[in-house]
Image: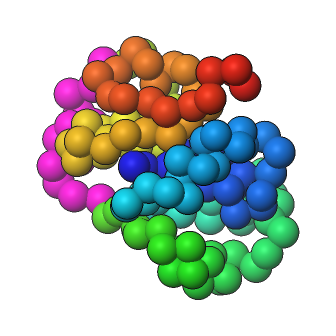
Amino acid sequence: MLLDTHILLWFLDDSPKLPDETKALIENAETVFVSVISLWEIAIKYSIGKLSLDFELQELPDFLVQLEIQTLPLTFTDIEQYAQLPLNHRNPFDRMLIAQAIAHSLIMVSADSVFDAYPIQRVWDQSQS
């Protein structure tokens, strides 16, 4: 299971935007990943003032360890997969997550229905869409 960036932030914040059913899926999953791409996106948006956090950025790795969320590195296979993706979605961060979900056969947890244009399985509580 691979968390989209907004899902990670909502999960860390215990946000009501994250449906209880989706939160339970994350909590009960055997393996949960967050991409290094999401961590990079968070750092970029935080550094330019587009994202505020309820914690210090340097605390994020400890939170991931505590929650047993593994960091998914970027591989050349992911980059090759990215290069083959059709431009159904233009956000480069999301496109890399899609490429990683495909390359690693991971279920994607995201509220973003644009992901459905790609050959991945997306999990989201549809009553919340």
Residue 12 horizontal side relative to residue 34, left or right: right
* Quadrant of res 111: top right
Query: Residue shown at 51%/19% (left/top)?
Result: 114
Q: Is 35 in front, or is 92?
A: 35
Q: Residue 69 location, x and y as percent?
A: 47, 68
Q: Residue 71 location, x and y as percent?
A: 40, 68
Q: Is 82 in front, or is 24?
A: 24
Residue 37 horizontal side relative to residue 43, left or right: left
Q: Is residue 68 above or below residue 2?
A: below
| Residue 31 appears in the picture as rendered | yes
Query: Residue shown at 37%/29% (left/top)?
Result: 121
Q: Which residues are magenta?
A: 74-86
User: Majority secondary structure of the magenta segment?
Assistant: helix
The C terminus lies in quadrant: top right
Query: Residue shown at 82%/60% (left/top)?
Result: 52
Q: Residue 91 location, x and y as percent?
A: 51, 32
